[in-house]
Image (cartoon, rainbow, N blue to C red):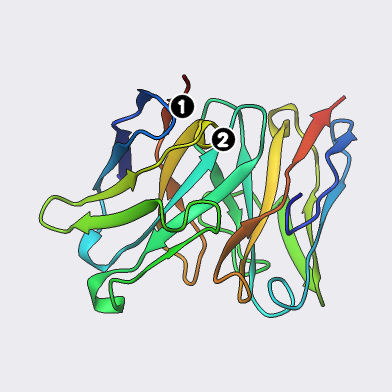
């Protein structure tokens, strides 16, 4: 059972907009910034969003992040086949004194 | 170009020990905070721990499942961090990734390809 809760799966067709939610608590999302990672099995994970809504250089602006209270969301617009991957939210947890990940959301592009 | 290369993975029996290494290049390692993250077969990503730069105090933090059994250290002269894993359990079987925490306080911008640790009798 992960500290941060994500839906196990999401799907969309090419060109659509999809959102992935991440629910936490005061000790993590409520008090610290949220990061989002994209992971294709067998490869190195990739940072997509940091500090709730900032994109590292090289990440397309199709990817955006937002946060409200103890929940965060990742939005992907103009869905492409190469977006098919696992997506994880993460945040520092003050109570655990460590970083925590969501359980991951498997995105399928239909 | 930033590069992180993990090594030292392999198969070990329950109760055994293993030391992983992560060699870094392409950035100023002495100022870098570094983390270890693992992924068990068929499971999601799990944070293992981190080590701050010496300038940041050089302290370490660990996830509850590994605290007291795993130790992260660094050798700035070799641009390398280590993960000493003792009293290994079957549930420690995973691919272990090292990552550079470039975006404070905990965003991992660059990751290695990972090294597989298998704990099996």
> Residue drawn at (67%, 68%), measured in percent from left and top?
A52
Give percent across and percent down for residue A96.
60, 69
Image vertical order of residue B67 relative to residue B97, above or below: below
Q: In this view, does A73 lie to the left or right of A37?
A: right
**Mark number displayed over residue B119:** 1
Dot 2 lies on which element? Answer: helix
Give percent across and percent down for residue A24.
78, 66
Dot 1 lies on which element? Answer: strand
Give percent across and percent down for residue B66.
48, 52
Q: Do we see residue A54 in this rendering?
A: yes
Image vertical order of residue B115 relative to residue B25, above or below: above
Q: Label 2: which residue?
A: B91
Location of residue B20 by image quarter: top left
Are there few (<14), some (14-19), or many (20+) residues within 10 Å of tag 2?
few
Using the numbered discs, state the Cα–Cα distance from disc 2 to disc 1 in whole angstroms: 8 Å
Give percent across and percent down for residue A46.
54, 44
Q: Mark 1 lies on which chain?
A: B
* Mark toward the start of the polypeptide (2 vs 1): 2
Image vertical order of residue A61 relative to residue B3, above or below: below
Asked whether disc 2 touches disc 1, contact meaning CB atoms under 8 Å apart, the reply is yes
Q: Do we see residue B2 in this rendering?
A: no
Q: Which chain carries label 2?
A: B
Quadrant assignment for the C terminus of chain A:
top right
Location of residue A67 by image quarter: bottom right
**Nearest the eye: A16 or A1:** A1
Q: In this view, does A58 lie to the left or right of B71?
A: right
**Nearest the eye: A60 or B16:** B16
């Amino acid at each position: 059972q992960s500290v941060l809760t994500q839906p196990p799966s999401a799907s969309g067709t090419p060109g659509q907009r999809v959102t992935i939610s991440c629910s936490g608590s005061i000790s993590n999302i409520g008090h610290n910034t949220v990061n989002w990672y994209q992971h294709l099995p067998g490869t190195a994970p990739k940072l997509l969003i940091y500090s709730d809504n900032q994109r590292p250089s090289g990440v397309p602006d199709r990817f955006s992040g937002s946060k409200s209270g103890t929940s965060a969301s990742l939005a992907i617009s103009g869905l492409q086949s190469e977006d098919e991957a696992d997506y994880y939210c993460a945040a520092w947890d003050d109570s655990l004194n460590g970083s925590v990940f969501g359980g991951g959301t498997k995105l399928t592009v239909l | 170009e930033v590069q992180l290369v993990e090594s030292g993975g392999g198969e070990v029996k329950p109760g055994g020990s293993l030391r992983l290494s992560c060699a870094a290049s392409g950035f100023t390692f002495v100022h870098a905070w570094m983390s270890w993250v693992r992924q068990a077969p068929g499971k999601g990503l799990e944070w293992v721990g981190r080590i701050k730069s010496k300038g940041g105090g050089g302290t370490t933090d660990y996830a509850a499942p590994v605290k007291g059994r795993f130790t992260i250290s660094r050798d700035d002269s070799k641009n390398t961090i280590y993960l000493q894993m003792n009293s290994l359990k079957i549930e420690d079987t995973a691919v272990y990734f090292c990552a550079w925490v470039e975006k404070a306080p905990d965003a991992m911008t660059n990751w290695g390809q990972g090294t597989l640790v298998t704990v099996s009798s």
